[in-house]
Image (cartoon, rainbow, N blue to C red):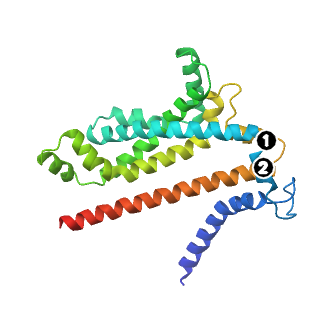
Amino acid sequence: MSRSNIWLWSAAVLTYAFLYIPLAIVVLYSFNDSRLNAEWVGFTLSWYKALFNNTEMLAAARNSLIIAVCASFSATLLGTMAGLAIHRYKLRVLPVLVFTPVAMPEILLGVSLLLFFLQVLNLTLGMVSIIIAHTTFCIGFVAIIVRARLQGMDESIFEAARDLGASPWQTFRLVTLPLIMPAVVAGALMSFTLSIDDFVITFFTKGVGEPILPIQIYTMIKVAVTPEVNAISTLLMLLTLVMIIVAFQLEARASARTMSRNEAGK
């Protein structure tokens, strides 16, 4: 192994260690038989039992899941349409309108949405305001992914479908949507992940009396990082890992179907 490869592998190992060792410690100490995370005492599942008996934490998790599902569905629908519009209509204003929430600092976006809800819409802050806020900043991420997928496609595929008599809706349903489905799924999963763990925008747009998971965890760690926080963090990591595996499986199946169709066409 050359000297340059040694430095490259060393940098890679240090980078991945920096990223994943803290996550491993969180998972490990969620099974620690001690309320203090100062040292390892022994293995236990009692903190998961305490977590599932914590009604306030369960309510926060339920609210966060509802918000994430609703926001990801809305953002995926609107973001897919935005990505298609940006790809088809070469208007300079469209990317600016769609991608601005992505580039905008979250604290600025949260304050602006708060003022918009209260002073313009006269909307009572709560679950609805959070869903609208999360949808707003997730649309751009979905549009970016869908647009990137469309840019790598051969436009002659869509022209051939139109030449064969397909209507615009049939072209979209039978040709465009199956081809961009991996990007749509990836955008939906990214929107779900961004929504369920967002703190800044949620903090500005939540109402009173609605526990939300990131804010609930922040409230709990003001005193100390308890094993219950480690337990809920472990479950969130597991959920994210499952979603990533599902996304890879769907993308692999879509790629396999595309390759089989291309071979059949030849």
How many numbered markers are drawn?
2
Does the CB distance between marks 2 and 1 fall below 8 Å? yes
Question: Residue placed at 61% from the left, 19% from the top?
Answer: 124
Position of residue 161 measured from the top left corner of the image (x, y, whole percent): 17, 49
Residue under pointer 1 = 220
Question: Residue placed at 60% from the left, 41% from the top?
Answer: 65
Residue under pointer 2 = 228
Tell me the kind of residue under disc 1. Met
Question: In this orientation, which residue lies closer to the viewer: 221 or 15?
Answer: 221
The earlier-in-sequence mark between 2 and 1 is: 1
Q: Is residue 168 above or below residue 231?
A: above
Location of residue 140 by image quarter: top left
Position of residue 66 measured from the top left corner of the image (x, y, whole percent): 58, 37
Q: Give the label, 2 or 1, closer to the camera.
A: 2
Whether residue 199 can be seen here:
no
Distance between the alpha carbons at the discs numbered 2 and 1? 9 Å
Element carrying mark 1:
helix
Q: Is residue 17 above or below residue 211?
A: below
Location of residue 255 by image quarter: bottom left
Instruction: Classify the position of the C terminus by image quarter.
Output: bottom left
- Apparent side of residue 219 relative to residue 152 in the rendered image (left or right): right
Tell me the kind of residue under disc 2. Glu
